[in-house]
Image: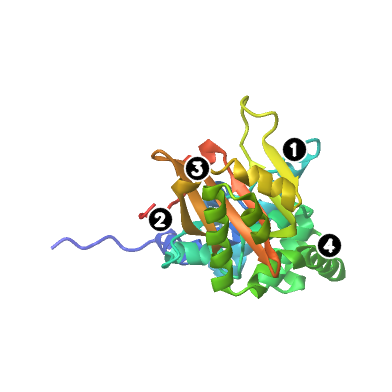
């Protein structure tokens, strides 16, 4: 009988790393809003961890989280410098799940109510503000552990999170609207779009509704994005959706009611929504065909 090879320290580290992978991917997704970049960061974190002696590391999960946070901060700084001269809006990667239930991987990504509206607000923060807020307010890291990552003292780090908190407050409004009411608004929006009923569309939209569309890079559009404001402008644009509405299906977009649209047998759009007491407050539309083709979709879509 052949004796199996003895486990090596590298094997043990790899096994321990896998127990933290979902948490690390969820952390990177919160910080970057990109599933592809989150996967790249987790892989980079593994490569870094595998090159050092971790026997003296008391809390491997916290240590790996710090590595992931530093890697994300580097990417956010590069991203910010590249976007300084651009007016285009980029939709974060949506996580699509079945209203009947999501996978453990999706639940790990969406823990702490990381809705699409929140991710969009986070995109407008400075890299340091985003890190301080996500690491403290969603992951519960103390400020004395976050401060070295953002290269600030503890009080300055606390102020970063406080400024971010004030800016994201409005993105959490949907949680105050009961879920049945949110689905009611989704269904009413789709019915009005299918029927081309402008007045019915106006009735389900908040007077100050904002719609953001990300077309992706390419020669077919004047820019990669378009932002519309106000109930009349948004309702008029939604009317152009009439011929595609029959291909819309209810889904959860980052844990909130939304819909997924197909044209023929191909993905056409993902629409994430935010809700307030007076109706739909935000409509975020991903139309980039390359990113749509890479989405992780429920098997029933």
* Mark nearer the N terminus (3 vs 1): 1
* Quarter occupied by residue 166: bottom right
Of labels 2 and 1, earlier in sequence is: 1
What residue does disc 1 label?
Answer: 82
Answer few, some or many: residues within 10 Å of disc 1's Cα (few below 14, many 20 plus, some between 14 and 19).
few
Out of 92 and 174, give the one closest to the viewer: 174
Which residue position is annotated with label 3? 244
Crowdedness near tag 4: few (<14), some (14–19) or many (≥20) residues, C-alpha within 10 Å: some
- Is label 3 in contact with label 1 (beta carbons under 8 Å)? no
SS under mark 4: loop
Mark 2 vs mark 3, foreground winner is 3
**Do labels 2 and 1 touch, CB within 8 Å?**
no
- The residue furthest left is 1
In percent of width and height, residue 9 lies at 43, 62
Judged by depth in the image, the label closer to the viewer, 3 or 1, is 3
CA distance for labels 4 and 2: 42 Å
Residue at the disc numbered 2 = 298
The image shows residue 223, relative to residue 135, as above or below, that is: above
Task: Give me the C-alpha separation between circle 1 and circle 4.
Answer: 24 Å
Residue at 77%, 36% in the rendered image = 86
- Separation of residues labelled 3 and 4 (CA atoms): 50 Å
């Amino acid at each position: 009988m052949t004796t199996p090879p003895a486990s090596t320290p590298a094997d043990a580290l790899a096994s321990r790393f896998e127990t933290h992978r979902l948490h690390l991917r969820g952390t990177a997704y919160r910080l970057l809003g990109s599933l592809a970049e989150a996967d790249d960061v987790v892989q980079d974190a593994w490569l870094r961890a595998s090159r050092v002696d971790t026997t003296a590391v008391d809390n491997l999960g916290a240590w790996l989280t710090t590595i992931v946070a530093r890697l994300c901060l580097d990417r956010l700084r590069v991203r910010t410098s590249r976007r300084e001269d651009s007016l285009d809006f980029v939709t974060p990667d949506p996580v699509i799940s079945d209203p009947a239930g999501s996978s453990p991987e999706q639940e790990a990504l969406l823990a702490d109510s990381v809705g699409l509206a929140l991710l969009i607000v986070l995109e407008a923060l400075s890299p340091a503000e985003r890190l301080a807020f996500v690491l403290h307010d969603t992951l519960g890291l103390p400020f004395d552990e976050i401060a070295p990552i953002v290269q600030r003292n503890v009080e300055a780090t606390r102020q970063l999170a406080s400024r971010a908190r004030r800016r994201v407050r409005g993105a959490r409004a949907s949680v105050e609207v009961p879920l049945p009411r949110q689905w009611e608004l989704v269904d009413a929006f789709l019915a009005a779009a299918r029927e081309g009923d402008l007045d019915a569309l106006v009735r389900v939209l908040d007077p100050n509704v904002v719609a953001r569309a990300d077309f992706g890079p390419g020669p077919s559009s004047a820019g990669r994005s378009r932002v519309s404001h106000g109930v009349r402008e948004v309702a008029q644009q939604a009317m152009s959706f009439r011929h595609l509405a029959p291909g819309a299906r209810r889904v959860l977009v980052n844990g909130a009611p939304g819909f997924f649209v197909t044209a023929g047998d191909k993905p056409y759009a993902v629409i994430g929504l935010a809700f307030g007491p007076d109706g739909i407050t935000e409509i975020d539309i991903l139309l980039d065909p390359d990113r749509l083709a890479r989405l992780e979709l429920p098997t029933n879509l």
